Amino acid sequence: MGQNTSTITQTYKPEPGTLSRSKVPYPPFELGKPRFDQSTYLGRLSHILDITDPKLLLTPKEKVECAVEFLDDYKNGTAPKYSDEQLWQWQRIKNSFFHPDTGEKIYAPFRMAGFVPFGSPIIIGLLWPNPSFAATIFWQWLNQTHNACFNYSHRNASKHTPFNKYLEGYAGAVTSAVTIAVGLQALVKRANMFSPTTKMLIQRFIPFPAVASANICNVVLMRKNELEDGIEVLDDQNNIVGTSKIAAKRALTETAITRVVLPIPILIFPPIIMSVLERSKYLTYNRGMRIFWHSIVVTACFAIALPHAIALFPQNSQINVSELEEDFKDKTAQTVLYYNKGL
């Protein structure tokens, strides 16, 4: 941990057994488990809101190092008796900064806590009215590049995936997004049956089909090997029971639905809201205020939509043994098994 570990530890180390000052009840601490109940939508939403909190980006480096050290001590059984709140908060910090499988540090723009702060400027650019073809290509490319880096930073590293698979998914996503966005933009501009105002309004909705189709393309290209080989299915003790193609198909379907639902409120609601606000003379003749309110509306929709979309399905979903391949009935006595859906 470095030469100043003891000094850093004393700085951030709380008193063992300190009573929680929070009014929010903390359940008994479980290492490596979510704090909130993942079987309910509200529990999953609370978990996502917890890990996407932008304030985590401001956590001092020394405090992060201490969180890792304390949790290692807890895992080894050498830590003093700390409160559940303290343990949950340390785990929250560690999980925000490090990949759970590899232990690699995740760069700030690609952390869960950084997705809205770093992604909002890209969405603002995507939704800017009446863009040029060059601007459309640039913002679609930048959006897919950010998504690709984010997905790679949160990849399931327990099962090796060749790096060329990620490149293939990235290239496919960029190609589909740019092709659809530029193609639709060209069609709208050439359509003579629409007035200039109507054309501008329609153009504002072009990013959605482009981004949604690119998201699906990315999932299929990057994870098509899972459909061929299957994914691991586990029991309630996290023991691997077997590999299932049926579970893989369901995991990809859930992921694809999430990635289509996520852009809806982000790319559909802001154009509608802005088209209403821009009827005001104050915004019509004030470019600065249009930029300001455009940014506020897009960022607010993004921040609200992200956790709600991700919470649609649990990260670790369950499936009945009766729905899996026949040989699973002989491998376990349990009636329900679990699989990692992926991002």
Image: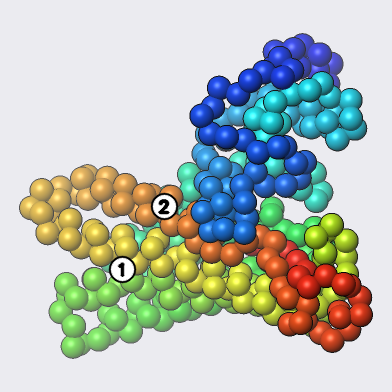
Identify the residue at horizontal 65%, vertical 38% (top origin). 27
Position of 34 with respect to 237 (left or right) is left
Compare residues 250 and 61 and report the one nearer the observer. 250
| Element marked by disc 2 | helix
Position of the N terminus by quadrant: top right
| Element marked by disc 1 | loop
The residue carrying mark 1 is: 204
**In 3D space, how far apart are the residues under numbered discs 2 and 1 (Cα atoms)?**
20 Å
Q: Could you say where residue 155 lies in the image, as x and y percent from the top left?
A: 72, 58
Q: Which mark is residue 304?
A: 2
- Answer with the quarter of the image where residue 198 lies: bottom left
Compare residues 70 and 21 and report the one nearer the observer. 21
- Answer with the quarter of the image where residue 22 lies: top right
Above or below: residue 27 compared with residue 343: above
Count of numbered badges drawn on the protein:
2
Q: Earlier in the sequence, mark 2 or mark 1?
A: 1
